[in-house]
Amino acid sequence: MSSRVFVIRAFILFVVITFSVRLFSIQILDENYKIAAENNIVQKIVQYPYRGLIYDSRDSLIVYNSPVFDLMVVPKEARVDDTVKFCQLLGIQVEDFEKKMEKALRYSSILASQFEEQISDALFAKLQDQLVNYPGFYVLPRTIRSYETDGLANLLGYVGEVSGSDLGKDTSGYYRPGDYIGIGGLEKSYEEVLRGRRGATYKVVNVQGIVQDDFRQGRFDTLPDPGLDVQLTINLEVQQYAEKLMKGKVGSVVAIEPSTGNILALVSAPSYDPVLLSGKELSRNFPNLIRDENKPLFNRPLQARYPPGSMFKTLQGVIAMHMGVVEKEEEITTDGSNIGDLAPPGVYDMEKAIQFSSNNYFYLVMKRMVQQGIEESAFLDSRIGYEKWREMVKVFGLGRKLGVDLPNEILGNVPTIEYYDRLYGVNRWKYSNLGSLSIGQGELLVSPLQMANLGAILANRGYFITPHVVDQINDWPNPNIEKEILPFDASLYETIIDGMEKVVKEGSGIRGYLDSLFLCGKTSTVQNPHGEDHSGFMGFAPKYDSRIAIAAYVENAGQGGRAAVSVASLIAEKYIFGQVSRPWLEDYVVKELYLNAPRPTIAEN
């Protein structure tokens, strides 16, 4: 019996000692429990950072932040004795109050969430004096994007509240419900640079939710880090002028500085005023923009796909001379029997074929590239020749992404061998099945950005810099820029460029001629099965030491020698000289006089 009593007493003593040690640890050594207890009277207030500012290439401010205020609620601490009076103060219905409180409770009973988003300055002023009567509610300062221009919307993108899908994709764990995130355009692609990092302050509150003091003298407070400022390559004056020319039209303009890859102007038409998707306006206007049949949210310079048309002949010429299937001065006689043509039958060398845009010349030249006679079977021969040709076309940036620092860039399309196998059957197609590719039609598809980059390649005589819209981030150069050198001798470009000079000086692009501009280019009448053809132009200026490469598309405007070359020439003049000396040409574009122009006597294709 005595031994059993001893065991029981020893066990009790062990339990007492264990609990005493644990209690000592909790109360004296470990502060976690003390902090947990303090959390019942500590309110965490998130401090949101200022989003980075955006400037143009000449330091003109484009995007900045304007202050707004969110009314926050912590449901567990919230007490509203007179709901009707509170609703009258906010200008809401009692039903809205109940829905907002239910939503806040579903999120968390102990964490703060938005009760009323982006309240007005006048309401904020009234609330400041009244909130002491409504424990659990407090005002949180935020910012929304504001703009110094009503353009550039498709390039800039917009900022909105983070969605559930965004939260699901966030592997960093940074975002919380109620945070803002860049959506589309520059705001999306440079989100991590522009957003900054949240801070937080901790306040001690009493049972009524009234702030009494800083928690632990602010030892746990963190300041928000503002986002980094971004300087664009965009020349705002040229951008706004290009937008003026494209107003009321459907199409796009891309202008690039060849030596740097800087995008000088990026116009998508029609577009929208960026303020329509800023702050509370986003939820009100976004559905209308989505439903708009003209698709103003569609970023045409990067996402639209067109057949390149006759602009494609410039790279065709370089590839053909590189492959040795034709010499630059070799004369080829065309009789107009191979493919439709506005250029007259006759004798053409490479320069003349570019100038007059001879479809039949380039049909015969591409036939030499594809059907080289190295295999007994014409089908196998075409298969081998086409693949060689296709890989060289892709070197020019077609059928692939160029790596521009904006989201949603498309590949375009340079058809694969597998595509023709599916269409015609394996070894059942040859050059006659794909001859329309020779003149930039058929299944070929390009974006306006790819065509502007082609202009930069020609201007540089064989290289390009990754096209980009951000030049510097907080005075640090954009690191995502590379130089790509094409595997063709620089001398091959000169014949093509001489022909492009004559296109503008005395050919289909003559409407864009200005003797001091030295514009070289190629017009395209882009076939459109759904209506009037699209007007296209690609070129650069001046001929030597080029400062601008440009591509312009005006949908349903007919011949390339009308709207597109006029738009491109005016923008090039504006950029190089700072002003425009041809008001008659400006009127021709702005008033869309080209729609009623008589049929040309020269080939405007």
Image (cartoon, helix red, strand yellow):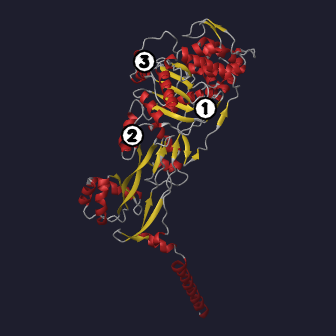
**Alpha carbons under labels 2 and 3: distance apart:** 34 Å
**Alpha carbons under labels 2 and 1: distance apart:** 31 Å
- SS label for mark 2: helix
Question: Which three-letter amino acid code belongs to the residue tagged 2?
Answer: Phe
Of badges 2 and 3, nearer the viewer stands 3
Residues at circles 2 and 1 in contact by the CB criterion of under 8 Å: no
Taking depth in this image into account, of 528 and 24 the one nearest to the observer is 528
Residues at circles 1 and 3 in contact by the CB criterion of under 8 Å: no
The answer to which quarter of the image holds residue 292 is top left
- Tag 2 residue: 286
The image shows residue 48, relative to residue 230, as above or below, that is below
The answer to which quarter of the image holds residue 506 is top right
Label at residue 594:
3
Q: Where does the image place residue 348, in percent across and percent down from the top left?
A: 64, 10
- Tag 1 residue: 400
Residue appearing at x 58%, y 30% in the figure: 453
Q: For this view, does 177 lie left or right of residue 12?
A: left
For marks 1 and 3, the one nearer the N-term is: 1
The image shows residue 595, relative to residue 177, as above or below, that is above
**Alpha carbons under labels 1 and 3: distance apart:** 34 Å
